Image (cartoon, rainbow, N blue to C red):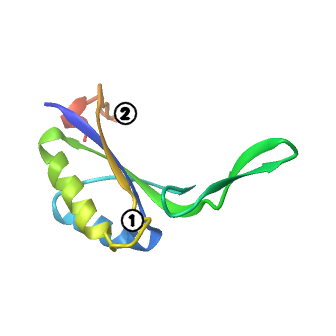
Amino acid sequence: MKVKLIIATIKPFKLEEVREALTGIGVRGMMVTEIKGFGSQSGHTEIYRGAEYAVNFVPKIKLEIVVAASMADQVVETIKSTAQTGKIGDGKIFVLDVGQAVRVRTGETDADAL
C-alpha cells in the first residue's frame, strides 16, 4: 500500500480545530512544529552591511501527517476547509510520496507502521 506525507502550514489559532477535524476522519497521529515564514502576506528583503536578508517572518504551524494514499485527498480537503479563514496567509498544503515508513518499536513497515 502506498503512503503519502502531507505537509501543511496553517495559522496558529487554527491548530486545535484542524487537529480535532483530522482526528474525526481517522488520522491517528501528526507532527506539529512552530515555524516562521512568509509568502504573499509579507516579507521583504533589506540590505545590512552589504548582505541581503529577509524580514517580517510570520508565525505559522507546520503539520506533518503520514497516511495511506487512499486517505490523502480526504486529509487535504479536511485541512483546507478547516484552516481556511478567507484571508491572506491561510497557508499551503503539499503532498509527497513516502518511499518507506518504519515503526521503530515493532519494525512494521509502510502502512502497517502508521
Mark count: 2
Q: Are marks 1 and 2 in contact (CB under 8 Å)?
A: no
Residue sitting farthest toward the top: 99
| Left or right for 7, reference 26 | right
Q: Amino acid at mark 2?
A: Val
**Most foreground residue, 32 or 41:** 41
Front residue of this view, candidates 49 and 31 = 49
- The percent position of residue 61, horizontal first and vertical second, equals 46, 60
Residue 62 placement, left or right of 30: right
Residue occupied by mark 2 = 104
Query: Going by the image, does 31 lie left or right of 73?
Result: right
Count neighbours of disc 2 (C-alpha within 10 A) and say few if under 14, some if 14 to 19, many if 20 or more. Answer: few
**Mark closer to the chain start, 1 or 2:** 1
Which residue in the protein does label 1 denote?
A: 90
Which residue is located at x 56 percent, y 62 percent? 42
Can you give x and y, in whole percent of width and height, for residue 75 in the image? 21, 54
Residue 43 placement: quadrant: bottom right
The C terminus lies in quadrant: top left
Residue 32 to residue 51: above or below: below
Name the residue furthest right. 49
Whole-percent x, y for residue 56 in the image:
64, 62
Image coordinates of residue 2 in percent, x first then y, are 17, 31
Q: Which kind of residue does numbered mark 1 sit on?
A: Asp
Q: Which mark is residue 21?
A: none
Q: Residue at x 50, y 64 (%)?
A: 41
Helix, strand or loop under label 2: loop
| Secondary-structure class at tag 1 | loop
The residue at the point 64 percent across, 55 percent down is: 44
